[in-house]
Image: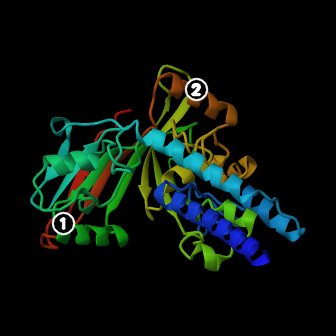
Amino acid sequence: MKATITSSIVASSLLVVITIIITLYHVSAFVGVPSSSRAAGAGAGLLTIKNDRRWCRLEKLAATGGKKRISGEEIRIRNLQQLDKLRIRDRQSKKISGDELKIIFEDKWLICVDKPSGVLCVPSEEDIPTLAQTVFETVNHRQSSLDRMVVHRLGMDTSGLVIFAKTMKILRELNTLFRTRKIVRKYEVLVCGHISDDTGTINLPIMRDYHQRALLNFDGKIVGKKLLEAPKASQTKYEVIGRETFLDTDLPVTRLLLTSITGRTHQLNVHMAAFGHPIVGDRVYGLDGDALPNGGLDYSESLSDNTSSASIELQRAIGTAATTAGCNMCAHAKFLSFNHPMRSPDDEPLLFESKAPF
């Protein structure tokens, strides 16, 4: 009887672990700024953060010998609810026809298209319209499946430039360019509040939100190395394009050009939220979003080096105005530049640019 009960407990624990792993790998896992994140270097607009309320809270609980206990079943239900929520969102993806495909550049190797907001880049499940499917069915290529055309992706609510590969050779070459950060990517965004400095760098490490592991004290050997990966260094440069008011209101917003230096998952969203200026219309990392607010930082900490941070009241007012106007997230992949892998290194780099729709 004892052996049977023990086996049942082990099986139940493994089921919880497997559920968490599947959820984190098949949906867009939230990320945030970890504890003790003090940025290195100096410069205008450089943000330094001392710690993270969430992680300090967990460390304090562990230090006092107490841990908040929640059942494995509760974790499983929460993960399934989140998965269902994201699936519902994905099913709202707009279908675009071949005639609606806005091609910025095309040759026999690759194609660059301008993705509208509200369209998934790649399918999360069958029968959901995606940009990749339209490209696969519309353009001439030598790929056997649409996933072999995908080089990178944008979030569903982000508009702008996306590259697709027409052959396996160019796919491998482009993957190398992205992995070695030899592609320049710039984004135009609207953020809450007026940023005081005209230029700056946000230098904060980010990591996936794996708080379930800390609460349940999972063994790293069981969960897996990738799941428990450490914080990764992340840098975002910003340049103020203009200081405006949102739509027909008097609510202050800033138009920025962001350069993703490291290209981490959700990096721009997390960094701007931690900086105290979340992207307008960001329903995940913005105020009252699905992820922790302020990039996972305590609100007072997010203000530590930035006196112009948007107040909670202002963020909420802009969020309400954006929802009322039916405004998607104001983030646009505006600029892409890289050396064409199939051309001479002496040739001029490819340079693509697209106008933001907001």
- Number of labels in the image equals 2
**Up-down relation of residue 260 to residue 157 (above or below):** below
Q: What x and y, as percent, mark residue 16?
A: 63, 63
The three-letter code of the residue at mark 2 reads Thr
For disc 2, the neighbor class at 10 Å (few under 14, some 14 to 19, many from 20) is: few
Which disc, if any, is residue 151? none
Marks 1 and 2, how far apart at CA: 43 Å
**Which residue position is annotated with label 2?**
320
Between 210 and 110, the one lying in front of the other is 210
Helix, strand or loop at disc 2? helix
- Pair 1/2: label in front: 2
Q: Is residue 179 left or right of residue 281?
A: left
Corner quadrant of residue 50: bottom right
**Which residue position is annotated with label 1?**
340
Residue at 23%, 51% in the rendered image: 352
Helix, strand or loop at disc 1? loop
Residue at 56%, 56% in the rendered image: 44
